[in-house]
Amino acid sequence: MSHPRTDSATLAELLIQHVYEMPVHLMELLLDRGDEAMEPLLAALDRALEQALPVDEEDGFDEDEDLDEEALLTPLWPIVLLGELGDPAVVPSLAETIRKGARGSYPFPLAAAEALAKIGPEALPALKDLAADPDPILRIWAYGALGWIEHEDAYEVLNEALSHDAECLDAVALAIQEHGRTEAIPLLYDALQRAEPWQRVELEDAIRDLHAGDGPEPLHEQDWRLRYRPEPRIGAMAPAWPAVAVVARQENLSRERKAIPLRPLEEILADAGATDGPEDRCDCCGVTWSAGPGVPVCPATAVAVTMIQHEILGRYRDEDELDDLFEVLAEVEAEAMEIHHGEPEPRSRKAREEREDRLSALRMVRGACRWLIERGVESVGGGRAALLAEAHRLADEFGDPGGFFSRPGPAETQRPRVGRNDPCPCGSGRKFKKCCGHPKRTEKARGEVGPAASDLFASGIPELSTFDGEPVSFGRAHFRMTDPRAVRDALARAPDLDENPADGSFTWSRTIDDEERRILGGIRLEGEKLTLECMSDERLARGKALLQELAGEHLVHRLDTAQDPWQAVDEARQTGGRGSARRSENDIPSEVEAQLVQKVLGRHYSTWPDEPLPALDGRTAREAVKTAKGRRDVAALLRSMEEMEGSKPSAQRYDFGGLWAELGIEELR
């Protein structure tokens, strides 16, 4: 979304109308405007609070107020942006937000507490006032923010609360644990002796985490574009521990849970070194779960899961025409929330399994989107390239039992039979009859042109290089432009960059001599995104340095991705070289396309003269050319092969001239 000529006040008004989804790009636009956006955001926050949190003087928050759904507004997005702007001038408004919404829906006061923590020490006076309030709910929100501010004064406020706020000892302990100071362990253990039985769990957790030094990372330190998104299962942003403490009190859950007995400090500390339990291990192999792209995976299926994520993302691009990962993420979250909250609970076992299958697929793609965005990738094309690279890495680490990247060994002479209802061996997670065994898929497979690149050589992989002798690597550097117009103007003035009027892209080249210019890379500009594409690591590094020199102040580097050239040629041959209205992320630069064909097919056809051929009655071509009839038969075979190659694009045709010469039958060509 782009509103280049819209004033900030109008944008802020649009912002609070997005009640059911996170308008990331609108928020980025307001954030880029800096101080200019602060007053409009404050005004929008006040208006949204007035409507979203109706209050009367006697009863406070009115949770049952009947509101016109079409007129709903949300204060959440202004709160988030004010925290990201980090101006101390907004502290009073954020503190007032906590006061107004303390007992209402937890996302608003929680986001305000996290925003105050981001502002830092300048928020301490307001937080001290909240921590001294008679309302324990207000104090918990304050303790949360004080725990996230690494400052001596914040720690002292919490230490003091540990000695006198018996009602909230559990929350104070968790806040102190956030500071990571092991000297607090004796103080926490002393408080444990005084705590109510239902508070002991949090106090023990704080002691163990401080001793182990591995407490959970605060949620608000995540990328804000991911932190405040809705969790589909609960329909709201993930609740940090202050929200859990507040909700537990409001629902009277804390006092109802089973109390744990008092234990010696040594016993509690010994628990800090405990190993993972059975729930942290894979059921099928007993190995501890590993971190896949956004989801925990069994090492045996890590590659398959990543390839499923790669495939599903491709469907969102091809079928839904989505190339923005934030749009895909919103689509996935909306679908998952509809399943969780909009559909009735299935009654039959089959319906429950189907529902879980749908949710599992959505969790996988949601995890992949978040994982990619955390690494600076924001497009589906770039995401698929990054997932492919991650699948390669996982295959190196855990092996490739599904054979996605490795060629079957010589001992594997026959594939096991796959039943129609068995899981498809491609790793898609679907039944064979609905995946690779489907008639349409098998018909498509029959029409593929030639073997895959990985099957065209028996041993070793030919090394590919650019004209400059650099190893080929199809690399991309992804940037966000803070001022797209300024970047385009800077590129247009560069002598080594030529703009393409058709699509606004730029070609980076250098002069070799008076008659030749050598292409070094390409630059694509789409909205606020800039992508530099080169085919060697060295060129990518030089290109990034050039961009930094030309427009560095307006560029934010997100991520570098790379694609193996052999994977690129596999995909190019599977499409038969056909063009597409949509630019492919796997386009092969013309400089190496002919080189790939000659090296890959050259290795394949180098053994052809010595292979027994049915068309020659089991003889090899080298044996057949020893007779006049055999020479004519071999020549006919070669002409037939050349005709087949002639139907392909010129860059993909193999030159059989070497075979004619090697067999000594050039005169018959």
Image: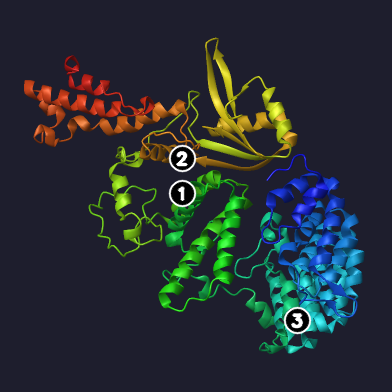
The one nearer the camera, 199 or 63, is 63
Measured as percent of width and height from the top left, residue 346 is found at 48, 76
Q: Amino acid at mark 3?
A: Gln
Q: Amino acid at mark 1?
A: His
Mark closest to the chain's N terminus, 3 or 1: 3
Measured as percent of width and height from the top left, residue 194 is found at 80, 87
Rendering quarter of residue 505: top right
The one nearer the camera, 303 or 354, is 354
Q: How many marks?
A: 3
Measured as percent of width and height from the top left, residue 266 is found at 69, 81
Q: Amino acid at mark 2?
A: Asp
Q: Residues within 10 Å of mark 2 (few under 14, many from 20)?
A: some
**Disc assigned to residue 392:** 1
The one nearer the camera, 98 or 516, is 98
Q: Horizontally, is 399 left or right of 126 in the view? A: left
Rendering quarter of residue 73: bottom right
> Which residue was labeled with disc 2?
564
* Residue at figure coordinates x 63%, y 70% from the top left: 234
Cα distance between the residues tagged 3 and 2: 55 Å
From the image, state whether disc 3 or disc 1 is nearer to you: 3
Answer yes or no: is residue 304 visible. Answer: yes
Mark closest to the chain's N terminus, 3 or 2: 3
- The local secondary structure at tag 2 comes to loop
